[in-house]
Amino acid sequence: MQYAGWPIAVFGVIFSKETECGLVDTAKAIRKIHRLPEQLNAINGTISVVAKDGRLTRYRTPIGEYWTPPDSGITGAVYENQADRYGVTALQGQTVLDVGANIGTFSRRALAAGAAHIVAIEAAPDTAEALRRNLAEPAKAGKATIIEKAAWDSKGTISFEVGHGMGNTAVENAGEHRIPVETETIDALVSALGLRRVDLIKMDIEGSEPNALRGAAQTIRRFRPRLLVAVEHRPDDFTAIPALVNSIQKYPSITPGPCILQPMRHRVSPEFIRFE
């Protein structure tokens, strides 16, 4: 999305005491958002509708065909996939938990990188249905398991905010589009599935990462998987999430991912942190 006020946001970032990125990374983030509209427009020209089924639409894209829910932001999903946001390679034989799987672009990429089994967790009903369709073949082959629940720190039911666009579903945010969803801990899911290994957990759930991490404590201690955890959703994520992870399991390598400009917050912050 183009943001006409981004020059003002830049000054806010430079003088902000809360900025987590240095000047070089800030400059890269500014250039990135400045080029984004042109890149998204180019991607739009490569996407076409293949079919519709109720509330879902199937698109043909440069990264394959995908079913999506209404207002899915498929262009953004293609952009993130092509940019290789998480830099995932060489997953031969590994078990991966995709927490906040959305329509499954990361799950498919992990399978293409050699993952033996994907557990894709997505709470939004329409998105979960699209996910099931997009992972139908690997699921049939026993390589993918789809869980339609919210990863949380306890089993139960919570109010879930269904937003617009890719990744805009957030737990316990104020809004008009709220629905009840079931919750479960990652520890309970891993136990129920009888997983003998967990090698990588990717987690991007719009600010609910702390809750999900607390519900994954046993899994993290037992398997010590690599973690890719989004830290762009809440102001204190960059410090609070590493502190939480380290209280569960010490990781010798903690590396911030690429920095992004968040114009409405007048800040630049890493998209995620990698724990290895």
Image (cartoon, rainbow, N blue to C red):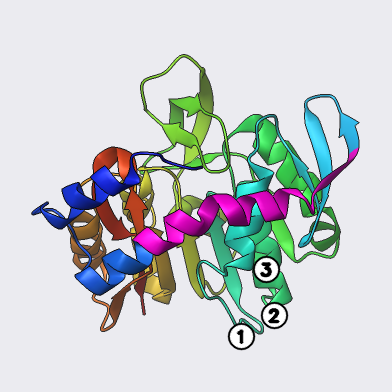
Which residue was labeled with disc 3?
109
How dense is the environment of label 2, judged by Cα within 10 Å: few (below 14), some, or many (20 and up)?
some
Question: Which corner quadrant of the image does residue 276 belong to?
Answer: bottom left
Numbered marks: total:
3
Q: Secondary structure at mark 1?
A: loop
Answer whether residue 203 is visible to the viewer in this image.
no
Answer whether residue 251 is magenta in the image. Answer: no
Residue 35: x and y in percent read: 50, 58
| Residue farthest along the right direction in this orientation | 51
Of the two numbered discs 1 and 3 on the same chain, state the one appearing first in sequence: 1
Label 2 and label 1: CA atoms lie apart by 6 Å
Q: Which disc, if any, is residue 264?
A: none
Residues at discs 2 and 1 in contact (Cβ within 8 Å): yes
Question: Which corner quadrant of the image does residue 114 belong to?
Answer: bottom right
How dense is the environment of label 1, judged by Cα within 10 Å: few (below 14), some, or many (20 and up)?
few
Residue 225: x and y in percent read: 43, 74
Which residue was labeled with disc 2?
114
Viewer-side residue, 123 vs 239 = 239
Left of 16 or right of it: where is 38? right
Q: Secondary structure at mark 2?
A: loop
Which residue was labeled with disc 1?
90
Magenta span covers which residues?
30-50
Of the two numbered discs 2 and 1 on the same chain, state the one appearing first in sequence: 1
Residues at discs 1 and 3 in contact (Cβ within 8 Å): no
